[in-house]
Image: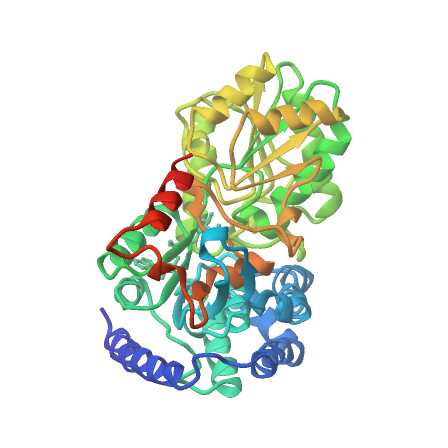
Amino acid sequence: MSEAEAKQIERMKTLLADQKAAFRSDRHRPIEKRKADLDRIAELCRKNADAIAEAISRDFGNRAKQESVIAEIAFVIQDVAHTKKHLAKWMKPRKVGVPLTLMPGKATIRREPKGVVGIVSPWNYPFQLAMAPLVAALGAGCRALIKPSELTPATAEIMKSLIADAFEEDHVSVITGGPAVGEAFSKLKFDHLFYTGSTQVGRLVALAAADNLVPVTLELGGKSPAIVTPGYPKDNAAKSIGWGKLFNAGQTCVAPDYVLAPKGSERDLGEAIIKVAQHQYPEAASDDAYTAIVSDKHYERLAGMIEEARQGGAEILQPEHDAQAAQAARKIPPTVLINPPEDAKVMTEEIFGPILPVVGYTELDAATDYIADRDHPLALYVYSTDKAQAEELLDRTMSGGAGVNINLLHLSVPDLPFGGVGASGQGAYHGESGFMTFTHERSVFKTGKWHPSRLLAPPYGKFAENIAKKQMK
Ligand code: NAD
């Protein structure tokens, strides 16, 4: 661990204590203050959009400004607007009915902020995946410490400085550092821990949180399949899948990881996807709109996956490109692999890059069995012109979220909870589900002077006997 990291670890312990003390005197942050907190987030996004997009592009080696604006900065602004619009309704206490025997008591659920929350974020959308959980936490009236990824240091630094300008340290603060800092961070006694990243590290985070009984949300990864059904127009499938796979060069948690297509159609579909890649990125891998791979290590992993599939006999489709220029720019060209071996890494690990296996199936049942035999994915996409068939395919599988004839964009619908299931995660956020993640539902039962427990206390008489009889029915 570096000296700087050791300092960050000391600093975060102090910050946590300060935030907890501040929360105690501000336990029920009024709606006006929460809305002002949210406005500060939207404002820092608007005022610094160029600088944020430049930092992200520097971290990746290249990322189109449009991708960063759409998927990160504007996304957060929209999230703020949605949260502010619905906040009063979400914060409202809920009255619930009481059984006859407990009348005239009144039962209410109070929606209370959990307190100080920890947010650990990954590198692939380094701004959005730290700020969107923060929007939910601030809407819920919480305070927050954020630990961004060390792989995107320029974005982490700009977030740290913008947050420091906009918020008091005992309200929101950013801690920088690598796995050692992340590990120490996940051992802190937060009131909630919100983690986005790999399944492997998510397991460690869950274990660390369990030690303190800290409630934890895990937004993890996995292999998200796209099923193309027989008869679905090939070009429509290719346009949609090619777009979703190549956005941010496949470094998207909900990107289609692999495609299941009717046997015999794999090559045609693969070629159509490569055509889409050529249309979207006419300069091939050197196109400015095409995102680079985040680090040399990630680049080498992806290049190794292609090589392994090649040696295993998979047919490889790529647009024409200058391999040397692509490598120098740390870009993996859009790559379709036709029927790679089942035990190849592209079929056993989350790919997280612009490589797309297209695998043939004989019957749709075999395709859904293939998915059901594996960990539940974060997303699943069905391409079908038959509504009943699409429903049936959803019925026969399980995933965190799903899209029918579309991919990625279910995460842009603010009222859809976003999260995984099983190995792809637990808990969810976005919209009201994000607010609820950082909210404790406190059950309160009130009575006036008279309360039924008096009739139910010993020495037991007729009333208690009748109540017991009634309840046993
Ligand atoms: P990662 O797990 O390597 O790192 C994520 C964060 O965890 C970083 O901030 C890192 O410093 C920290 N960390 C590392 N070791 C730690 C430890 N021992 N204890 C605590 N924290 C630690 O993940 P990554 O490579 O940055 O992200 C890629 C993965 O994230 C992919 O699997 C992807 O699918 C997933 N992901 C999921 C979502 C989602 O919303 N479900 C979104 C984006 C990415």
Percent across and percent down for residue 130 are 49, 66
Q: Nearer the viewer, residue 70 or 457?
A: 457
User: Where 398 sits versus 441, above or below?
Assistant: above
Q: Nearer the viewer, residue 228 or 209?
A: 209
Percent across and percent down for residue 28 are 47, 79
Q: Name the residue: 24% across, 72% down.
A: 2
Percent across and percent down for residue 246 are 62, 45
Give the quarter of the figure containing the N terminus. bottom left
User: Where 140 sits versus 32, above or below?
Assistant: above
Q: Where, by quadrant of the figure, is residue 322 drawn?
A: top right
User: Where 247 sits versus 43, above or below?
Assistant: above
Q: Which of 246 and 109 is in front in this view?
A: 109
Q: Name the residue: 76% across, 33% down.
A: 236
The quadrant where ligand 1 appears is bottom left
User: Where 471 sits versus 315, above or below?
Assistant: below
Q: Can residue 164 be seen in this view?
A: yes
Q: Name the residue: 71% across, 33% down.
A: 238
Please count the marks in the image. Answer: 0
Q: Where, by quadrant of the figure, is residue 403 drawn?
A: top right
Q: Is residue 390 left or right of residue 164?
A: right
